[in-house]
Image (cartoon, helix red, strand yellow):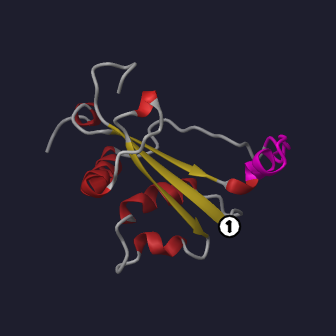
Amino acid sequence: MGGSSAGLSNKLPLLFVALYFGGRQASRYLLNRHVNACSASQPLLTTRRQAFSPEELRALQAGVQELLPDVKTQPLGKGFKNTRGLVLKFSADGAHRLSDEDDGAYAFLVPFFESVRDPEANAFVLNVLIIPPSENVADP
């Protein structure tokens, strides 16, 4: 199957996956004030362009396509009215269940999780937001 990943993204929902490391910003929510607990060598946010190969991206999109029938539309506000999503919360001890053979519905997320996993974190929230294709940028 030839073609670029750009052509593939025009046909499939946009997938946004975020992994939050709760300990880094817990002070903001628990104390109602920001405590900068990160040094320059440990930033809150890093970005990587083309973090996945076209094959890895296709596998991630295929996993999402497989989940779509089971994921309900989430009322996240006007700008997200047609989106769907899911949130997975787990500890470091439970991370292996992502790829568990008996409960491996989310195994397609393992490459993403492992690529961004903070070895010092012990609790995770994996937020998958599925945004359908739309011609109207202001109204997906």
Q: Position of residue 75 (x, y in %)?
A: 43, 40
Residue 105, located in which quarter of the rendered image?
Answer: bottom left
Of 125 and 3, nearer the camera is: 125
- In the image, what residue type sits under mark 1? Asn
Residue visible at 29% across and 57% down?
Answer: 67
Where disc 1 sits, the SS reads: loop
Q: Residues within 10 Å of mark 1 (few under 14, many from 20)?
A: some
Check residue 8 for magenta coloring: no
Q: Quadrant of the N terminus?
A: top left
Q: Quadrant of the C terminus?
A: top left
Residue 16, located in which quarter of the rendered image?
Answer: top left
Check residue 35 for magenta coloring: yes
- Given the current orientation, which residue lies at the most extreme left position? 1
Return the residue at label 1.
Answer: 122
Q: Is residue 43 above or below residue 140?
A: below
Residue visible at 40% across and 19% down?
Answer: 138
Q: Is residue 16 above or below residue 89?
A: above
Q: Is residue 139 above or below residue 105?
A: above
Q: Position of residue 89 (x, y in %)?
A: 55, 63
On the picture, is 6 further left or further right than 109? left
Q: Position of residue 49 (x, y in %)?
A: 49, 35
Residue visible at 56% across and 53% down?
Answer: 116
Residue visible at 37% across and 20% down?
Answer: 137
Q: Is residue 1 above or below residue 101?
A: above
**Magenta segment boundaries in residue numbering:** 24-40
